[in-house]
Every structure is written in structure tokens, then in C-alpha cells.
Image (cartoon, grey):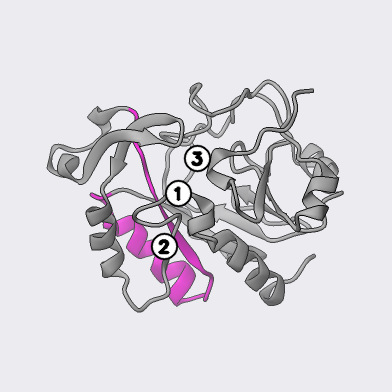
């Protein structure tokens, strides 16, 4: 097995990645960073952090930032049982896990918004672009306003610029994101969108100026908040 390689995005953070499955994710969410050969490491072997490293560093294990924790679930649960502090990621609305869950509410092949009851959910992740605020508004209304579940906006990057509508092309710029180049949303566009939700407690993944988790820490904070709010099953 390959030596564990730290995710460049997580360097210095309290969160550490873990993906028990191999191969591309069958969910095939549109513009997935994990599939298509753009992930920073091989998908041919599991990606499992050493337990001693997790314990000594007080790390929180982020299970399936790529792939999906509801796929090969028995394997996922078996291989992650040893980690005391962890949370699971999924775009499938099934939340029966022994730790909090991050739910991507507009993932899956069609990318359509799923409005469900967020039992055991640490936060709801919403994939956002600059030309469709209707999806974000509906997610915020359903999950945060009506149910009090935290919402985190994830601003999408596009490898294929043709997917960006003509009227929105000025909101994006071609640049390197960690290890690959994409059409990335501009900081000023992020600030414009976030101002739409000012005073509502809406969070964003990363910051308008940095993609490094050490500069964000949402997952770390919301994990411990979830452990107080929904606990561990």
C-alpha cells in the first residue's frame, strides 16, 4: 500500500482525509473534482490515515471528501470504526451513520436539489455557481431557516469553460487551484454572493481569498457543534 499522502488543501488543519473505496465515484456528480483524473493522488488504492497519527495530532477524520460514504457502506463503516473523531460525506440522503454527516444536497448525476429531513447532519453543503441563486435560496430556506441545520456554500470550479453561460463568464478566471487549473470564481463575485445572505449565518467553504482549510476551519468548528447538537448514534 502507498504511504499516506496528505491532501495539500488540509496541510496545517485539524482535519485529515480518508477514502476507503477505490476507483471513481459512481455518483458522477457534474464537474466532480474527484473523477476524471484530476485528483491529486491515485484512486487505485484506499486512502487511510495512520491511527497513531490521527490520535497524536488530535485529528478529525473527514471520510469521503471524494467518493461517497453511502457507497460500499459496510466497507466504509468497517474501515473507519477505529477512528474516534470522524464525520462522513455523502450526496445520498441517507444519514444512518455512527458519526455526524455532511450532506451535499445538490449532488448526484443530475445535480438537482434534494430537500429532505436532515437527521444527524453536521451541515448541508450546497454547490453554487454565480448564475443560479434559486438553488441556494431554496436550500437555505429549507435547511437553515426552517430546520436550523447549518448551510455551507461551495463555489464550483469548471474545467470546461463552455459550461459557464456567456453572461457569467466575467465572474470566473482561469487559474491554478492547488494542483490543477480551472475556471475559478473570482473573489469579488464570492463577496457579492455572500452579501446576499448577510446576517443569516451562512458559511462558505474556504474563504474568498484562500482554498486552504487552515484559513477556514468550518469543518472543525461545525463538527464539534454537531457533536453537541446531534451527538453520536
| Depth check, front residue: 83 or 26 | 83
Which callout, 1 or 2, points at the residue further toward the start of the chain?
1
Residue holding disc 3:
108
For the N terminus, the quadrant is: top right
Residue 139 forms part of the magenta stretch: yes
Q: How crowded is mark 2: few (under 14 residues within 10 Å), some or many (20 or more)?
A: many
> Which mark, residue 142?
none
* Residue 97 falls in image quadrant: bottom right
CA–CA distance between discs 1 and 2? Answer: 9 Å
Q: Residue at x 25, y 50 (%)?
A: 130
Circles 3 and 1: CB atoms closer than 8 Å: yes
Q: Where does the magenta region start and end? A: 130-159
- Residue 210, placed above or below residue 172: below
CA–CA distance between discs 3 and 1? Answer: 7 Å
Helix, strand or loop at label 1? It is loop
Residue 45 forms part of the magenta stretch: no
Residue holding disc 1:
106
Q: Residue at x 54, y 55 (%)?
A: 214
Circles 1 and 2: CB atoms closer than 8 Å: yes
| Depth check, front residue: 124 or 135 | 124
Residue 172 spot, x, y in % from top left = 23, 41
Q: How crowded is mark 1: few (under 14 residues within 10 Å), some or many (20 or more)?
A: many
- As drawn, which residue projects farthest toward the bottom? 199
Residue holding disc 2:
139
- Residue 127, placed above or below residue 3: below
Which callout, 2 or 3, points at the residue further toward the start of the chain?
3
Circles 2 and 3: CB atoms closer than 8 Å: no
Q: Is residue 32 left or right of residue 71?
A: left
Helix, strand or loop at label 2? It is helix
Amino acid at each position: 500500500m502507498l504511504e499516506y499522502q496528505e491532501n495539500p488543501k488540509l496541510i496545517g488543519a485539524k482535519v485529515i482525509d480518508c477514502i476507503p473505496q477505490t476507483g471513481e465515484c459512481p455518483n458522477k456528480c457534474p464537474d466532480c473534482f474527484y473523477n476524471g483524473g484530476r485528483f491529486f493522488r491515485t484512486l487505485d488504492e484506499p486512502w487511510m490515515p495512520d491511527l497513531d497519527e490521527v490520535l497524536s495530532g488530535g485529528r478529525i477524520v473527514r471520510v469521503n471528501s471524494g467518493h461517497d460514504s453511502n457507497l460500499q457502506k459496510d466497507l466504509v463503516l468497517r474501515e473507519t470504526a477505529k477512528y474516534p473523531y470522524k464525520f462522513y460525506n455523502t450526496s445520498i440522503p441517507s444519514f444512518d451513520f455512527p458519526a455526524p454527516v455532511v450532506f451535499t444536497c445538490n449532488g448526484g448525476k443530475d445535480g438537482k436539489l434534494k430537500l429532505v429531513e436532515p437527521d444527524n447532519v453536521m451541515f448541508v453543503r450546497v454547490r453554487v455557481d454565480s448564475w443560479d441563486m434559486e438553488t441556494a435560496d431554496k436550500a437555505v430556506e429549507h435547511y437553515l431557516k426552517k430546520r436550523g441545520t447549518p448551510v455551507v456554500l461551495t463555489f464550483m470550479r469548471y474545467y470546461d469553460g463552455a459550461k459557464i453561460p456567456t453572461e457569467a463568464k466575467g465572474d470566473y478566471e482561469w487559474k491554478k487551484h492547488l494542483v490543477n487549473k480551472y475556471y475559478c470564481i473570482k473573489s469579488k463575485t464570492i463577496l457579492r454572493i455572500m452579501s446576499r445572505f448577510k446576517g443569516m449565518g451562512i458559511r462558505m467553504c474556504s474563504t474568498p481569498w484562500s482554498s486552504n482549510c487552515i484559513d477556514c476551519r468550518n469543518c472543525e468548528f461545525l463538527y464539534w457543534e454537531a457533536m453537541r447538537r446531534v451527538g453520536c448514534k
